[in-house]
């Protein structure tokens, strides 16, 4: 019985051809990473929420809250926002409390009784916002002063997309002495 041993080629070195399977796996991994990157970008970049520069203004006596409608969805708003929260940024010359609420099926400009203008009035966290709904800020102060409030930032999910975006109008409240 004779055994066959491979003989090296004339140059004295053995060579190994690259594996096609390795290139195929690398190509699939690259394609998968590209698809995941596109999906991540699309899911975190929804269409911007409507904004305006028109300032909502109101006056209220010390200790009495005023409610300002700062971000309302128009009747033709074709999105459903699942709101995680509303962030409010303000500067004030006095101590104030600012609480965001959601007005379902109504519209508020500036009032002390928002329930009369809303079909349903409640918290923003965990709420669903559709056409005809509005974010309303409850502002109350303990001393006379002026409160300047930036546009609200809405933290939401819309289908497979999610974002935190500026929305609505800036506002200003003057708190009057009694």
Image (spheres, helix red, strand yellow):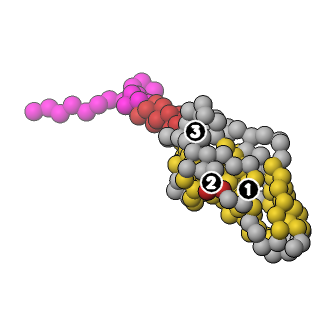
What is the quadrant of the C terminus in the image? bottom right
Give the spatial CA distance, label 1 vs label 2.
10 Å
How many numbered circles does the render carry? 3
First in sequence, mark 3 or 1: give its number: 1
Q: Which residue is mark 1?
A: 111
Of badges 3 and 2, nearer the viewer stands 2
- Label 1's element? strand
Q: Residue at x 74, y 66 (%)?
A: 65
**x and y percent of residue 99 in the render?**
68, 63
First in sequence, mark 1 or 2: give its number: 1
Q: Is residue 117 left or right of residue 43?
A: right
**x and y percent of residue 34 in the render?**
53, 34
Give the spatial CA distance, label 3 vs label 1.
21 Å
**x and y percent of residue 28 in the render?**
43, 32
Give the spatial CA distance, label 3 vs label 2.
19 Å
**Image vertical order of residue 23 relative to residue 110, above or below:** above
Q: Which residue is mark 2?
A: 116
**x and y percent of residue 155 in the render?**
62, 52
**Image vertical order of residue 51 relative to residue 69, above or below:** above
Of badges 3 and 1, nearer the viewer stands 1
* Magenta span of residues: 1-24
In depth, the one of 68 and 40 nearer the eye is 68
The disc placed on residue 131 is 3
Q: Residue at x 25, y 33 (%)?
A: 5
First in sequence, mark 3 or 2: give its number: 2
Toward the top, the furthest residue is 10
Q: Main secondary structure of the magenta part?
A: loop
């Amino acid at each position: 019985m004779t055994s066959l041993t491979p003989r090296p080629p004339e140059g004295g070195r053995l060579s190994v051809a690259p594996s096609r399977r390795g290139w195929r796996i690398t190509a699939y991994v690259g394609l998968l990473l590209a698809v995941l990157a596109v999906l991540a970008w699309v899911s975190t970049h929804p269409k911007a929420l409507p904004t305006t520069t028109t300032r909502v203004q109101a006056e209220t006596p010390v200790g009495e809250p005023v409610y300002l409608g700062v971000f309302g969805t128009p009747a033709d708003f074709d999105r459903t926002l699942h709101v995680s929260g509303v962030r409010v940024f303000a500067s004030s010359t006095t101590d104030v409390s600012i609480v965001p609420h959601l007005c379902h099926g109504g519209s508020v400009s500036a009032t002390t009784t928002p329930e009369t203008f809303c079909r349903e009035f409640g918290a923003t966290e965990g709420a669903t916002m559709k056409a005809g709904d509005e974010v309303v800020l409850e502002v109350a102060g303990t001393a006379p002063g002026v409160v300047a409030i930036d546009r609200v930032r809405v933290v939401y999910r819309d289908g497979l997309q999610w974002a935190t975006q500026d929305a609505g109008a800036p506002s200003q409240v003057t708190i009057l002495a009694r």
